[in-house]
Image: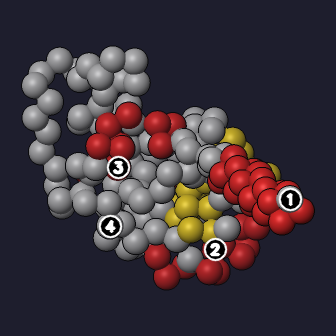
Amino acid sequence: MKKLFIVSAILFSAFSYNSVRAQVSLNVNVNIGAQPVWGPVGYDYVEYYYLPDIEAYYYVPTRQFIYLSGPNWVFAYGLPPAYRGYNLYSGYKVVINRPRAYLYHDSYRIKYKGYKGNRSQAVIRNSNNPKYYVVKGHPKYKSQGGGNKAHGGGGQAKSKGGGKGNGKGHRNR
């Protein structure tokens, strides 16, 4: 009887431990639908993009650009005036998941200076991965509520560059 009790206790403990671990592992952040169509493919969660070409940041949750103007950080819904014509689709974006990433600007500016002028990154708009169809503005956009294709039409979208989700980004954790 003691052996049965001990085995039962061990099995119950193992089951409880695995159940708790499973609950913890299910708490994963995902914000694909909030990412802009010019963002790089390959990320389920993004807080900031660092744009080495213009030394600015984009904060995904509020959809704001953050850049230095003199000694002050400016939060704006548009690019800095000097870069209004900058092509967000072709410029390289470094993913940074760190609170208030712009406060570490000196470090990022040095670390990612080699990515200035790099135009090799695949973007969400050109991806054929269905997980990106929830991004508003994607050619195959489907709202979360009913799967209707946006912009009428038959959903036939052409993708430049193949967009297979093999973008070379950097994940900072």
Amino acid type of disc 4?
Answer: Asn
Gap between marks 2 and 4 measured at Cα: 24 Å
Amino acid type of disc 1?
Answer: Met
Residue at 28% x, 49% y: name it.
129
Residue 155 percent location from the top left of the image: 14, 30
Q: Earlier in the sequence, mark 1 or mark 3?
A: 1
Residue 98 percent location from the top left of the image: 72, 59
Residue at 14% x, 39% y: name it.
157
Task: Name above or below for residue 116 compared with residue 125.
Answer: below
Residue at 66% x, 72% y: name it.
108
Q: For the N terminus, which image quadrant? A: bottom right
Q: Nearer the viewer, residue 134 or 38?
A: 134
Gap between marks 3 and 4 measured at Cα: 11 Å
Mark 2 and mark 3 in contact? Answer it, CB < 8 Å: no
Gap between marks 2 and 3 measured at Cα: 24 Å
Q: Which residue is mark 3?
A: 124
Q: Earlier in the sequence, mark 1 or mark 2?
A: 1
Q: Which residue is mark 2?
A: 109
Q: Which residue is mark 4?
A: 166
Q: Earlier in the sequence, mark 3 or mark 4?
A: 3
Answer few, some or many: residues within 10 Å of disc 4's Cα (few below 14, many 20 plus, some between 14 and 19).
Answer: some
Task: Name above or below for residue 152 compared with residue 59.
Answer: above
